[in-house]
Image: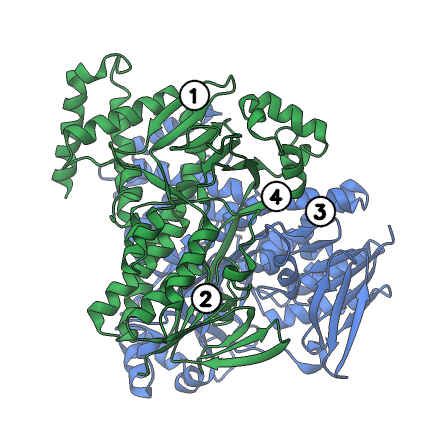
Chain colours: A green, B blue
Amino acid sequence: MEKKAIIVGAGLVGSLWAALLAKRGYSVDVYEMREDPRQAGFIGGRSINLAMSTRGWKALQKAGIENKIREVAIPMQGRMMHSQSGELAFQPYGKEGQAIYSVSRGGLNIELIRIADQYPNLRFHFAHKCLGIDLQAGVAHFEDTRAGQRLSAQAPLLFGTDGAFSAVRRSLMKLPRFNYSQQYLEYGYKELHIPPRADGSHAIDKNALHIWPRGQFMMIALPNVDGSFTGTLFLPFEGKANSFEQLQSDEQILSFFQEQFPDSIPLLPGLLEDFHTNPTSGLATIRCYPWCYEEKALLIGDASHAIVPFYGQGMNSGFEDCSILDELMEAHQDDWSTIIKVFNQERPKDTNAIADLALRNFVEMRDRVADPRFLLRKEIEAFLNEEYPEDFLPLYSQVTFSHIPYSMALQEGFAQDELFGRILAIEGIEENWKNNPELGEVFRQWLREREGGR
Amino acid sequence: MEKKAIIVGAGLVGSLWAALLAKRGYSVDVYEMREDPRQAGFIGGRSINLAMSTRGWKALQKAGIENKIREVAIPMQGRMMHSQSGELAFQPYGKEGQAIYSVSRGGLNIELIRIADQYPNLRFHFAHKCLGIDLQAGVAHFEDTRAGQRLSAQAPLLFGTDGAFSAVRRSLMKLPRFNYSQQYLEYGYKELHIPPRADGSHAIDKNALHIWPRGQFMMIALPNVDGSFTGTLFLPFEGKANSFEQLQSDEQILSFFQEQFPDSIPLLPGLLEDFHTNPTSGLATIRCYPWCYEEKALLIGDASHAIVPFYGQGMNSGFEDCSILDELMEAHQDDWSTIIKVFNQERPKDTNAIADLALRNFVEMRDRVADPRFLLRKEIEAFLNEEYPEDFLPLYSQVTFSHIPYSMALQEGFAQDELFGRILAIEGIEENWKNNPELGEVFRQWLREREGGR
């Protein structure tokens, strides 16, 4: 087979995947609907900051760009919870030295395009909108939106990395027996800007992911290298109280923030303008199956598995797709029939698991992080991980700081929920639990049962 | 508001709904992609027979067509199971005198069109393919496929009754935050024809739904008034054994039938021709939400909730949509803002429940009906229903012979599963259970717990 591929979509996953394919000697043509962000700049206003974690870094390393991104990534060692009265509480994500990294989507995308563009066997075609794919023939149809002309391209391999509203997936959807689901949350989100202090420094602790958890809704903020933070308000679209529907006038918006997030008001000098200018966007989970057409076309990233942002794993899971495919190329020597078959069979259970975990984590972020028993559980989790490093890795760490398949992590998570049902039922566990011998007993009993069950 | 409506789709639900609307004085225009079946005949070959039950009859009564259809409906009082060795076992669906009714889809559709067409304020437009809807303006675009011309129609109310592949739903899908899911079974189905005997009589018992349950697959047959049966084979599309993929040559088909359904071979003189000629079709569950656009457009029937055929409730649930809407019209005096809002809020939980029940029933039909313990349960269910008519109605009867909302029936079904977990655990329950005092004790205990829980 000719080593030639078309990639539709030059977002994060598309440009990374293009670089990995080009590195392996493929002739690659990448078509992207938008203008080149290196010239046009990156259009913001509705992009939640990225939280790069272990799975993402691995793929960046494969592309040879890890160190360059690390330089502009801000480590966030934990969550900083802001109570209604403005009290702060910090909860670490993992062990000493572990962190997730705040990265700008636009900046990362531009770097990925730059690294990919260094390969002479790779060509970017910006301002090319995909109109549809003839899957059988391997022909993709585009509109060159600058020239106002239509054109077609053909290759034995075609990848759809064109995101949640994928045009490539729309062509797959016309096939018989294509399974598809798009489910929206009742919540929307809106970006709000927290500028740097006058001296250019960050206005709040820059090494944390800030959360204002309010039960049924929340605000978060992630640091940027320029000293600012990107804040995001997550709120129901509709409802009689605390909904976007109810926040129309300046007065309504201000009184809502004064009541719910009083400590954020000095941080948000452009609150009203941001609120009126920035769109209120929806949050969807998208699943489909199969992800491929024969050995000719494959969906990667959000195009086949878009998730809600609450586990910080959307980009990380898309990048992990690329790592896995790269390893399959290595193992199967460019035998795409096998590579696509194996990927299509094995990967969806993991992306379905992270989709479920991300939905679960919304409740955790907006509600449970404010619950003392949840924080107690997190402390005991860290303790057990320290005491029994071989036998206990908290779910959050499995997802964020490991390469354990998401589906295994989800199963482990259920078992850990069961364990903590028992632990938190121990009488007086709240006090002096480090010296409570029952804790270790309950844990070892749980472990024995699990080993017995294996 | 002007009492004027557009209906897209003149299938079973569309033509019934058109009649009910016209009866209430609305000016109705019905657009249908296909030719008029009164002239063109009904195109068969992939339509499973219908099993009309209580919910369906109610809607037909409202349309004034119940008696006419009863004349051409064949009562099926129960399931007739055919074992591999050709033994027969009969299991009644309900009480003495209760039955589901085999009805021809084509014949029923033609009768519904006839009754609707008697209203002077109703017009059918056949061979009009819907190209899309401008929801805001209430304008529907069509292609008159005979004349090869495009035209548009406008009305304050628009109903999408255009089935599982609804064009109206495609327009709703373009709205922000539309939830949608289509899930296919790994199984396909193929229609096979069982002709009448030489004397015109039915070749097997006509008052039963025949099932050849074989664990992972099955064949069924429903009687027709002309003495024939419509057989349907349900089989996995793919797989190394017992799949459509493996049934290509005449020899493969014959040896599969000889092994699995030997008693059916004399019944199927055209087996090989049918098998090669009739398509292998897929089986999907389709769910979406919302079902409406403001108070202007509404999906009804398969367009918003297509289900697999294994509970015989696809048409019945679509007809129940019509009954419910008719009652809402009565209650809310043509206040469509309220009618559509209430229907969109209340009805989906019930159609989701019947979708789940239909998926569950596939396992029951192809596998559990051959299990002696399942048959024992069915006998005990009938006995309990007789002994405690106020307190126990089997799930199947709730779905089939009542108007209990599907979602309530599904919940009752879970409670009944729990009850039978206890009953079938009674020692020696298999023998002489009618005189086992424990049976009544367990039942009354279950009843007390449920009443306590209310």
The subunit letter for the residue under badge 4 reads A
Residue B328, placed above or below residue B206: above
Helix, strand, or loop for circle 1?
Answer: strand
Q: Earlier in the sequence, mark 1 or mark 2?
A: 1
Mark 2, other Cα within 10 Å: few <14 / some 14–19 / many ≥20: some
| B381 and B271: which is toward the camera | B271
From the viewer's perspective, tell me whether residue A25 is left or right of residue B227.
left
Q: Is residue A427 visible?
A: yes
Q: Residues within 10 Å of mark 3 (few under 14, many from 20)?
A: many
Between marks 4 and 2 in the image, the one whose residue lies nearer the viewer:
4
- Chain assignment, label 3: B
User: What residue is disc 2 on?
Assistant: A178
Secondary element under disc 3, as helix, strand or loop, is helix
Judging from the image, what secondary structure is the residue with disc 4 in?
A: loop
Asked if the residue under mark 2 is in contact with the one under mark 1, i.e. CB atoms within 8 Å, the reply is no
Q: Badge 1 local density, few (<14 within 10 Å), some, or many (20+)?
A: some
Which residue type carries mark 2? Phe
Q: Amino acid at mark 1?
A: Leu
Mark yes or no: residue A300 visible.
no
Residue B5 spot, x, y in % from top left: 80, 59
What residue is shown with label 1?
A88
Residue A265 or A68: which is nearer the viewer? A68
Give the residue number, with chain letter if any, for mark 3.
B340
Give residue A217's position: percent from left, percent from top: 53, 31
Q: Which residue is mark 4?
A: A280
Is there one chain holding both mark 1 and mark 2? Answer: yes
- Quote the CA–CA distance across marks 3 and 1: 47 Å
